[in-house]
């Protein structure tokens, strides 16, 4: 087999993952075999199991959307979209997906694809990542920044601003990865992850992509997020380097150039130069315009008489400031969030005043920097 092929590896992985997941689900004993054969530029993937099998009548309908296999013992048959989508993806890649089976004698799925062998050098040029991503986030600035970066890397991004929208979009579309904000208006990112995982384990969903916590919280370790049902963590503000590392865990040959900068110490304390370089100054200027409209409303919600509201608002300011590259303001908001969480009324009052007095000055400094 060649080392490098020109094909959509993400879609191929998705099809094979669905076939193997189904084989595991419906095989109580025996074995599951994956074979790959080549005939010139034609590649034949075979997934064979010794499970319950599929009757001839059901084989006529198994690739139809929402069709469910009957008599599945104790297993739930799932939503019936996995095989339909897999066949559609195979045909979009100029291939096909078929099945051979007898009831009680297992099933064999045949995936055929055409792909040309290429050199390693060509693979670097052609291997532009293309993922369908569901971004669940309720802060406009965070959405703008994350969506801009992801789309610049060639990904397609759908956005949900609350848990209900996220679940609706998930059930209507196929996503390769989910980025879940933790604090949402109606439910937490953890609750979304738990709901989706339970439905997958109960057979309601045929496929569950990696679910990544998208958070500005630096206090919790990655292990804590994993224990609460997430598959990984991506910190806000999103950076090319962190995104590369995150995607590399699930899509092994993800390859993007990482921007490395020798930051001026004074400037890097005030501004996130790497973010500015990644987004471009014109995009930062657009983001700052939205930030200036949003900030007065946040300031009005800060009060040393209401620690919980101040904690929540400081968290939003921290994320918004980070999303436009305002490091100094982000640090102040982070300190205020911690003070409010600890009910430190005196320091909260001091920090609220400092943020109120300095935020516009920081914005004007960044505007000058971007226009220079």
Image: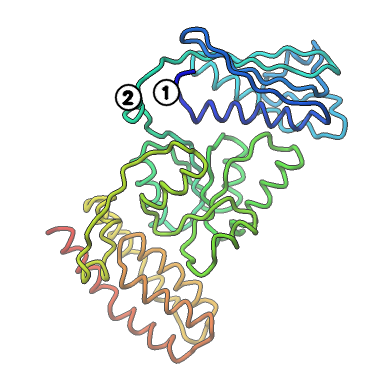
- Where residue 115 appears, x then y in whole percent? 45, 15
Image coords of residue 53 (percent x, y) = 80, 19
Question: Disc 1 marks which residue?
Answer: 4
Left or right: 353 in relation to 227 = left
State the residue at coordinates (53%, 38%): 176
Give the residue drawn at x 72%, y 47%. Answer: 198
Residue neighbourhood size for the residue with mark 2, other residues' Cα within 10 Å, grouped as few (<14), some (14–19), many (≥20)? few
Q: How is the image coloured?
A: rainbow
353 or 94: nearer the viewer = 94
How far across and how far down the image is residue 284, in percent?
26, 55
Considering the numbered disc 1 on the image, is that residue within a helix, a strand or a loop? Answer: loop
- Based on the displayed image, in which of its 4 quarters is residue 171 positioned? top right
Q: Position of residue 354 (x, y in %)?
A: 33, 83
Which residue is found at the position 41% from the left and 21% from the top? 6
Query: Mark 1 or mark 2: which comes first in sequence?
Result: 1
Answer with the quarter of the image where residue 270 lies. Answer: bottom left
Which residue carries the number 2 mark? 122
Residue 97 position (above or below residue 143): above
40 up-or-down from 7: above or below: above
- CB atoms of marks 1 and 2 within 8 Å: yes
Marks 1/2: CA distance? 9 Å
Quick one: 29 or 315, which is closer to the camera? 29
Q: How many marks?
A: 2
Say which residue appears at 54% left-offset and 51% top-offset. Answer: 212
Q: Secondary structure at mark 2?
A: helix
The answer to whether 23 appears left or right of 153 in the picture is right
Of residue 118 and residue 27, the one placed in the foreground of this image is 118
Residue 21 vertical placement versus 168 (above, below) = above
For label 1, count other residues whose C-alpha is less than 10 Å away and answer few (under 14), some (14-19) or many (20+).
some
Q: Looking at this rendering, what residue extends furthest in the left direction?
A: 372
């Amino acid at each position: 087999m060649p080392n490098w092929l020109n094909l959509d590896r993400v879609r191929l992985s998705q099809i094979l993952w669905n076939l193997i997941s189904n084989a595991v689900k419906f095989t109580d004993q025996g074995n599951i075999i994956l074979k790959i054969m080549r005939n010139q530029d034609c590649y034949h993937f075979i997934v064979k199991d010794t499970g319950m099998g599929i009757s001839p009548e059901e084989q006529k309908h198994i690739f139809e959307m929402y069709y469910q296999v009957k008599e599945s013992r104790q297993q739930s048959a799932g939503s019936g979209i996995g095989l339909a989508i897999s066949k559609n993806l195979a045909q979009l890649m100029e291939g096909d997906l078929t099945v051979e089976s007898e009831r009680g004698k297992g099933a064999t799925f045949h995936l055929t694809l055409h792909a040309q062998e290429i050199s390693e050098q060509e693979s670097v040029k052609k291997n532009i990542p293309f993922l369908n991503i569901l971004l669940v986030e309720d802060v406009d600035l965070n959405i703008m920044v994350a969506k801009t970066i992801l789309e610049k890397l060639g990904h397609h991004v759908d956005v949900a601003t609350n848990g209900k929208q996220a679940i609706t979009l998930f059930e209507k579309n196929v996503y390769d990865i989910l980025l879940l904000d933790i604090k949402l208006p109606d439910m937490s990112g953890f609750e979304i992850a738990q709901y989706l995982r339970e439905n997958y384990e109960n057979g309601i969903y045929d496929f569950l992509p990696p679910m990544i916590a998208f958070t500005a919280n630096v206090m919790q370790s990655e292990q804590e997020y994993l224990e609460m049902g997430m598959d990984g963590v991506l910190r806000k503000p999103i950076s090319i380097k962190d995104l590369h590392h995150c995607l590399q865990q699930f899509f092994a040959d993800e390859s993007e150039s990482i921007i490395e900068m020798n930051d001026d110490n004074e400037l890097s304390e005030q501004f996130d130069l790497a973010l500015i370089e990644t987004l471009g100054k014109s995009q930062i200027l657009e983001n700052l315009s939205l930030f200036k409209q949003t900030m007065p409303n946040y300031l009005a919600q800060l009060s040393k008489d209401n620690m919980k509201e101040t904690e929540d608002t400081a968290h939003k300011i921290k994320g918004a400031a980070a999303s436009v590259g305002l490091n100094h303001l982000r640090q102040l908001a982070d300190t205020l969030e911690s003070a409010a969480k600890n009910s430190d009324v005196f320091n909260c009052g001091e920090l609220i005043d400092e943020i109120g007095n300095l935020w516009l000055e920081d914005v004007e400094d960044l505007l000058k920097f971007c226009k220079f």
